[in-house]
Image: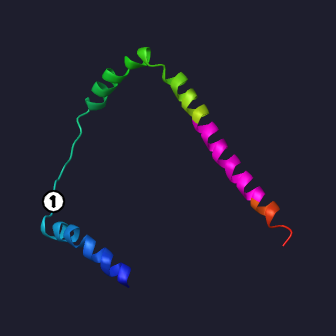
Amino acid sequence: MITDAIIEFLMSPVNYLIENFKLPDVFNIVIPDKAFDTILGIIRPLGYFLPTDVILTCLLVSFSLDRFHIIWALFLRLKSFASVHSFF
């Protein structure tokens, strides 16, 4: 109950702003047909300078090694905990 009161006290300015300053209603948001063609026209030439397949492969290997290290450390921690407390 004390925690709820503290959180409510801290959130009161945010709640005040949300209640009193509403965003205007926006109707009919239309994205032009050629907007994505322009973005692709800008991004496609970057593929010649940034080999994304190689970069993605390196990132995948790096993330896999990080996850392996985390899982291996967790496994070793649990194994050492189980071996120490197994004779009780």
Question: Is 65 inside the magenta-drawn segment?
Answer: yes
Q: Residue furthest top?
A: 48
In the picture, residue 87 is in which quadrant? bottom right
Circle 1 packing at 10 Å, graded few (<14), some (14-19), many (20+), is: few
Q: Position of residue 76 (x, y in %)?
A: 74, 51
Residue 59 figure quarter? top right
Q: Is residue 45 magenta?
A: no
Query: Residue drawn 28% across and 25% down?
Result: 38
Q: Is residue 30 above or below residue 48?
A: below
Which residues lie in the magenta part?
63-80
Residue at the spot x=26%, y=71% of the render? 11
- Name of the residue lying farthest toward the right: 87
Q: Which residue is mark 1?
A: 23
Image quadrant where one finds the C terminus: bottom right
Residue 54 falls left or right of residue 9: right
> Left or right: where does residue 66 sit relative to residue 5?
right
- Secondary structure beneath dot 1 equals loop
Q: Is residue 88 found left or right of 73 in the rendered image?
A: right
Q: Return the x and y of residue 68 as percentages of the image width and height.
A: 66, 42
Kind of residue indicated by mark 1: Leu
Nearest the camera: 36 or 61?
A: 61
Q: Quadrant of the N terminus?
A: bottom left
Q: Is residue 73 above or below residue 64?
A: below
Q: Nearer the viewer, residue 55 or 36?
A: 55
Which residue is rendered at x = 36% and y = 83% of the image?
2
Residue 20 image offset from top left, x and y in percent: 13, 69
At x 31%, y 31%, the residue is: 36
Residue 56 appears left or right of 49? right
25 or 12, which lies in front?
12
**64 in relation to 74, above or below:** above
Is most of the magenta stretch helix, strand or loop? helix
